Every structure is written in structure tokens, then in C-alpha cells.
Amino acid sequence: MRIEVIKLKEENFFGKVLPHNVVAIVDDGLTLVDTSLPQNLDQLERGLHNIGFSLDDVGFILLTHSHPDHVGNAEIIRRISHAKIIAHKLEDFTPKEFNLKYEHVASELKVSRDEFESTVKRINKITYEPPRIDVRLNGGEEVSGFRIIHVPGHTPGHIALFNGETLITGDALRVDGDIRPPLSFFNWDQEKALKSFNFLISLPFKRLIPYHGELN
């Protein structure tokens, strides 16, 4: 098994550049874990070429959750490659606007009001074709050599992947200097998010791949 990380980025995220770590699992085929934003499709395609693949080679797309920076290219890749899209049964992929308050965001991030308003306006204008989910998971299944772990909190049907050594977390945690819980203002249920975070960091992983932040 090969595990490759395609490093993409999102500009103008509350005044910063936010990393996107799309994972390519090469086992008996090619599986992508998340797909980044629509404007990153060309970069994603170049990243696949750099590891010897193309969009046509994608057999499965595992979506950790429904936010646009994770699902933005899933449906177009499915149409290109006829990949199967896989997600948890509790996750709703209907696009929604983020209703954020400046005070909540500023309590966690150093952000000016202008940067806040610019980011919220940008993310609520992101358009993409909602993914058609082919396989719905309960949690506990094995997909592409990884066990699926249901870690609700950031969203109801958020999943992580663990194979005994490598832990792929989506947004259930982030790495910003230290390993941290997800930003609370994006969480569906903060109490559940912290419980899921604490469970994930208790696992005996040797390699940690968050969707946002440095690889560990």
C-alpha cells in the first residue's frame, strides 16, 4: 500500500492560507480521501500526475464529511472516472451557507472584521455539484485497507480512517503547531467534537494526516 498526500491550499481563509491535504491511497486501485475546493481541480490533477496517476484512475472517493472544501470536486471526478463515492449514512450533502458570527471566530483566530467578512462572503459563494453518494457507511467497515471510524461532532456523519499506523482525520482534528480540536465555530456539536477528538488522539498512530495543518 502507498499513501500519498497531495498538498493544496485555500487562499483568504480568515487572513491566512489554509492547507488542504488530499490523500491518495494506492492499494488494489486508487482511492481519494476528500477532493478540495472546485478551483483546486487543476492542482489536484497535477498532484495525481506527480505520483503517476490521472483523474481517470480514481476508483473510489471517500468523503470525510460534507463541507465544500472536502467535496467540491467529488462529483466531477466521479463523472470522469466512474469512481464510487463513499460517505457515512448520517452525512447530509445538501449545500448550506455558514452562519458565522465575528465574535465567535475572533475568540479562536486572530482575524479582523474585514478578513472575517471577506472569508464568509467567499465561502458562502462557493458553488459545486453535490456529490451523489454510492455507498453509505455505518462505521467499522474496512475500505482500501483502512477501518472507518465514525467521529461525529464537526458534522453528524464525519469519519476518520485508521489502519493501525496511519490516521487520516479529515476535520476531526487539526495541526497548528500542536494537535488541536477542530475550530468550534464550524462544529455541528461541540461536545461530540471534543469527544471524537480525544478518542482519535488516544489511538496508537505512527503517522497523522489531518486535512488542515502540518503532517505529523
Image (cartoon, helix red, strand yellow):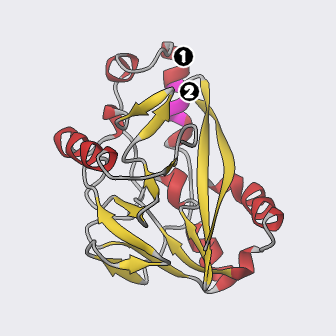
On the image, the x and y values in percent for residue 113 come to 48, 14
Q: Can residue 99 be seen here? A: no
x and y percentages locating residue 175 in the rendered image: 48, 35
Q: Quadrant of residue 43?
A: bottom right
Amino acid carrying mark 2 in the image:
Ser
- 148 left or right, relative to 211: left
Is 109 located above or below residue 41 in the figure? above
What amino acid is labelled 1 in the image?
Asp
| Left or right of residue 208, residue 48 in this image | right
Q: Nearer the viewer, residue 209 or 116?
A: 209
The image position of residue 132, as x and y in percent, is 46, 77
Dot 2 falls on a residue whose secondary structure is: helix
Q: Residue at x 71, y 81 (%)?
A: 57
Q: Which residue is mark 2?
A: 118
The answer to whether one can see residue 37 in this image is yes
Q: Is 119 within the magenta? A: yes
Looking at this rendering, what residue extends furthest in the left direction? 191
Chain part drawn in magenta: 117-121
Query: Is 139 covered by the magenta stretch?
Result: no
Q: Of the numbered discs in the image, which one, if any, rests on residue 114?
A: 1
Find numbered disc 1 in the image and state the secondary structure of the residue it sits on.
Answer: helix
CA distance separating discs 1 and 2: 6 Å
